[in-house]
């Protein structure tokens, strides 16, 4: 549920590398271009950036160095357009130091790479930042929802909703999760390829609606809701990486589509809320919790706030978990030995029994598979914005500075994770060296950490076990690439379910 989550210390030196073609070995090393080539000029400036080379001798004190390779007017914007290019860019930026600057169109944006500084920004210095640009654009879902709210409204709303996400309450959701997911899984046609990401999105969306809204619409209306969520998320990320406000108000096809999707989503959720109002004694879920809530003056929450809260929960609650599960089965399809170990554990622990909460603690390998998938395919972009002048590490960020960090790039840093591109669930065994504090943050950290982290982990474990007990998923031929959407999506993931011979 995140998008709505110390080897490179605050004082670590910037690492340099010479990537200029045909450069002399005697040439002074410079920071290499990320995403696009840039050419040095005789006066030691970069074409297209107007900035000095980013070396200690040329860097102004207290200002994060600028990553070279930008273009006039658009800056590094082209590197942030296109799903796979964004990921390459964010990974490459880590080579330039614990904190750097890029230009997204006319705006300066600071990227924080150091796990120590990210942890500080999310915990001890959290009150010095708002959630920033991405969350501002996510107001398409509703401007007052918990994932977007700031300050005291955020704290009040989090305290109000926290009981629905207590561990004891989540344990009670396991039956609902199982009963919601099993019809999807049993309905698969063995031997017929599935669009696995879409299947997982429908499952996780169904779980959120069943567990939190006491509603489970048929497949066709559910797909309409799913497409609306995808459209709004796609629009939000585009507006965040190229924040040009006047373009958002033009009557373009994309803007009209986003507005229509937001309206359709809110209309679908409004029907659920209306049903709860009509029969208030029949429900015990988060919708009824919001309807019965009272503020400090004794007033009920405004209808629009309840609607926005439910819409945001539905969107955030299904996105990250679904994508994680799609990647998990993709990795198992590429690693038969890992898949075999999963089948053995599920057969031994669950067998033909009805899956219950008591089984989950006896599935450690299944849990490590989920954890490793969260590491390798974490969200690629999270934003913050400085409220006032902020001292972070060696640099002072002026008020209003846009800040981003990437769990995807952080989790793939070889300084933090040995052999980082290898899918290795056993790296999380207690006897293995663990990453430093702040280096594993798929759900964020601090008081704004995703409220649904335990819900998501439980749901992912339940779905993984239920699928593994019944099916073996075989990948169709083709290359699956990671794409930076609102989270890190597979470009296209078709897999063939085959009944297991147990």
Image (cartoon, helix red, strand yellow):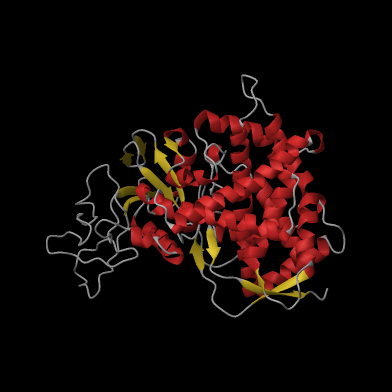
287 on left or right of 123:
right
Residue 420: image location, x then y, percent: 51, 64
> Which residue corresponds to the image point at 54% horizontal and 76% vertical from the top-left?
479
* Quadrant of the rendering where the C terminus is positioned: bottom right
Farthest residue to the left: give it: 43
Up the image or down, 63 lies above or below 492; here it is: above
Residue 67: image location, x then y, percent: 30, 56
Residue nearest the viewer, comparing 202 with 416 = 202
Farthest residue to the front: give it: 251
Q: Is residue 85 visible?
A: yes
Residue nearest the viewer, comparing 69 with 440 = 69
Q: Is residue 362 visible?
A: no
What count of labels does the image hold? Answer: 0
Up the image or down, 1 lies above or below 90; here it is: above
Residue 366: image location, x then y, percent: 71, 60
58 on left or right of 103:
left
> Which residue corresponds to the image point at 42% horizontal and 61% vertical from the top-left?
86
> Which residue corresponds to the image point at 68% horizontal and 28% vertical from the top-left?
293
492 on left or right of 385:
right
> Which residue corresponds to the image point at 79% horizontal and 50% vertical from the top-left?
176
Residue 80: image location, x then y, percent: 39, 59
Farthest residue to the top: give it: 297
């Amino acid at each position: 549920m995140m998008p709505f989550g110390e080897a490179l210390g605050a004082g670590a030196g910037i690492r340099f590398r010479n990537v200029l073609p045909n450069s002399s070995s005697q040439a002074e090393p410079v920071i290499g271009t990320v995403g696009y080539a840039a050419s040095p000029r005789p006066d030691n400036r970069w074409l297209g950036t107007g900035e000095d080379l980013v070396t200690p001798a040329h860097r102004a004190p207290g200002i994060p160095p600028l990553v070279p390779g930008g273009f006039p007017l658009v800056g590094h914007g082209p590197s942030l357009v296109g799903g796979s290019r964004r990921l390459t860019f964010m990974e490459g930026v880590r080579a330039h130091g614990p904190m750097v600057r890029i230009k997204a169109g006319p705006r300066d944006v600071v990227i924080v790479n150091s796990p120590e500084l990210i942890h500080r920004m999310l915990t001890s210095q959290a009150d010095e930042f708002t959630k920033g640009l991405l969350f501002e654009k996510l107001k398409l879902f509703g401007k007052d929802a918990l994932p977007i709210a700031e300050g005291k409204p955020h704290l009040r709303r989090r305290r109000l909703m926290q009981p629905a996400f207590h561990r004891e309450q989540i344990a009670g959701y396991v039956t609902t999760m199982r009963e919601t997911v099993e019809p999807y899984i049993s309905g698969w046609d063995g031997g017929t390829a599935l669009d696995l990401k879409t299947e997982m999105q429908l499952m996780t969306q169904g779980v959120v609606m069943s567990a939190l809204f006491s509603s489970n619409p048929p497949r066709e209306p559910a797909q309409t809701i799913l497409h609306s969520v995808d459209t709004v998320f796609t629009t939000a990320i585009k507006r965040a990486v190229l924040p040009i406000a006047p373009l958002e108000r033009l009557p373009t096809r994309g803007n009209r589509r986003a507005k229509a999707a937001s309206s359709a989503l809110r209309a679908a959720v409004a029907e659920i809320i209306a049903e709860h109002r009509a029969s208030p004694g029949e429900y015990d879920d988060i919708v009824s919790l919001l309807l019965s809530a009272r503020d400090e003056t004794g007033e009920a929450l405004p209808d629009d706030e309840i609607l926005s809260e439910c819409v945001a929960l539905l969107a955030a609650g299904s996105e990250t978990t679904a994508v994680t599960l799609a990647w998990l089965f993709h990795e198992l399809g590429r690693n038969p030995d890992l898949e075999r170990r999963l089948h053995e554990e599920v057969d031994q622990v669950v067998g033909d029994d009805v899956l219950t909460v008591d089984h989950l603690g006896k599935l450690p390998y299944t849990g490590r598979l989920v954890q490793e998938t969260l590491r390798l395919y974490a969200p690629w972009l999270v934003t913050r914005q400085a409220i006032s002048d902020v001292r972070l590490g060696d640099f002072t960020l002026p008020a209003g500075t846009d800040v981003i960090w990437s769990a995807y790039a952080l989790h793939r840093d070889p300084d933090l994770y040995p052999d980082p591109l290898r899918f290795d669930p056993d790296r999380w065994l207690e006897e293995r060296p663990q990453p430093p504090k702040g280096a594993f943050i798929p759900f964020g950290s601090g008081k704004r950490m995703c409220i649904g982290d335990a819900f998501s982990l439980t749901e992912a474990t339940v779905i993984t076990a239920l699928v593994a007990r019944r099916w073996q998923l075989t990948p169709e031929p083709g290359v699956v690439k990671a794409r930076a959407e609102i989270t890190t999506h597979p470009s296209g993931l078709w897999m063939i379910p085959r009944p297991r011979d147990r």
